[in-house]
Image: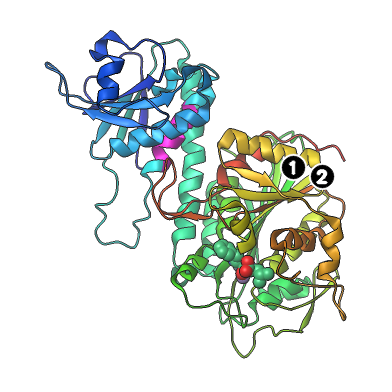
Amino acid sequence: MGISVTLSRTADASTSAVGIPIASDGPLSSDLRLSRKDLSALGFEAKSGQTLVLPSTAGSKQVRILVGIGDVKSVTPSTLRSAAASLARAASGHASLSTALVSAGRGDKKANAQAVVEGLLLATHRYVNLKNDKSSKSKLSNVVLVATDSARATIEAGVARGHATAEAVCRARDFANTPPGHLTARMFADQAVDIAKASGLRVQVYNRDQLEAMGCGGMIGVNKGSVEPPRMVKLTYTPRNAKGKVVLVGKGVMYDSGGISLKPSDPSHAAMKMDMSGAAAVLCAMASLRDLKVRTSVVGYLMCTDNMPSGSALRMGDVITMRNGKTVEIHNTDAEGRLILADGLSLAVESKPDAIVDIATLTGACMAALGKKMAGVLGNNQSWVDQVKSSSDRTDELVWQLPLHKDYRKLLDSNVADMRNIGGPLAGTITAALFLNEFVADVPWAHLDIAGPMDTDGDDGWLNRGATAFGTRLLIDVVENFRKPRK
Ligand code: BES
Ligand code: MN
Ligand code: ZN
């Protein structure tokens, strides 16, 4: 990782910049030698995430960067994550930075430290692998967290956790940003094997023939038009004395051309290299579980293939048979994500878990409904969906629940098969989820539709231009805080 974070009990004068948290209320430190009036004359109201760079004072070489944290009583880890991100951006021209930001929050020191490290690391991440000129990378390489109180061990633990979660996100962003020619299903599976081995996960890779023998008709069908073979990767994390078992299923469409329902050639479709963001989130979240000492058993299925048109591709009207035996009539080959997830969900159910989460860049309709700042969540068990929502609150990866309205199931009715793969122009996110619901039996299940927040146009808080790896931290939080849902 780019930034090394260390702790210090006393202010560190050796860093070239110092980040000073400022609340929007209460007294200002006399060291600042500035009044509220001075600050507001400079346009600085200490709103959460606002920054102001001040020249160093006489006798000091340190540039001061004020960072707003808003009303001191409402500071949460999310506030600190965003403040740390703004601070890292403002300090990106400095090699070193010290800050007392962790102690600016009142609550849980461990959660605060974790959030600060996440903000620093996530805001400075850049995908530069394919650039010759890597100068867009932040220069910040050394951050000293100043915490004068006695909670050093707690803060250290939070810092380590922040490193683990941020590393998971940065890795997942790198995967999602990687162009389709540089990351085929085979290459992704190979890298998953390496990552799994390095992080204590059992890994099994299934090729085309194996998937066919297993009856995974969704995977085989979607892959039919492609010259690149599919891969399904099964990851298994088994801690001692596990307190439950969760299966995560990730959509891994390496490139979604739409198949013969070809997408129009507008530039936004270059983003379809990110159609494997769900699978990347599952892989990278799982790779952090051992370091985080998670006590839940977790199985992950990465459903990887691209969706291409050709003479061998799925046609409209074709009927395929899924892993659980249900038949599906294809009415739009661009509704491919649900077909591969269906096989993953069927396999998940067979392993009799306590709960399932799937994560997928599934519908443009979800982006139309909720925009780019939040994912849709739907499920068959409210107490499980509520756990996902709690994780969303803690990680600040926003979700909004949409109804799994059973009456709309008839929109999927087919004349010749058990169902069609699209439900028509209305309620596209709900009908997609109702399709998936056909494959989860009665296992508590939550579905995350991350089509909106999978990427972002501009640098914003702890998000950076390009792939966001949305859901990676949320999935980690979900399995970490897992409780068996009430049925
Ligand atoms: N991968 C897309 C969904 C998507 C769209 C993700 C935009 C991110 C940004 C998915 O496979 C898709 O094509 N969905 C179709 C479904 C439709 C054919 C029922 C869509 O949303 O148009
Ligand atoms: Mn599609
Ligand atoms: Zn897709």
Nearest the viewer among 356 and 290 is: 356
Tell me which image quadrant ligand 2 sits in: bottom right
Quarter of the image containing the C terminus? top right
Q: Tell me: residue 403, above or below residue 142.
A: below
In the rendered structure, which segment of residues is drawn in magenta?
Answer: 113-122
Residue 476 is labelled as none
Q: Tell me: residue 367, above or below residue 139.
A: below
Q: Is residue 120 magenta?
A: yes
Q: Are marks 1 and 2 in contact (CB under 8 Å)?
A: yes
- Secondary structure at numbered mark 2: loop
Q: Does the closest atom of ligand 1 sit within 8 Å of the Cβ of label 2? A: no
Residue 381 is labelled as 2
Could you say where residue 222 lies in the image, as x and y percent from the top left?
66, 75
Residue located at (40% from left, 20% from top) = 24
**Image quadrant where residue 396 sits:** top right
Residue located at (43% from left, 42% from top) = 122
- Here the colouring is rainbow
Q: Is residue 254 magenta?
A: no
Could you say where residue 156 lies in the image, as x and y percent from the top left?
46, 23
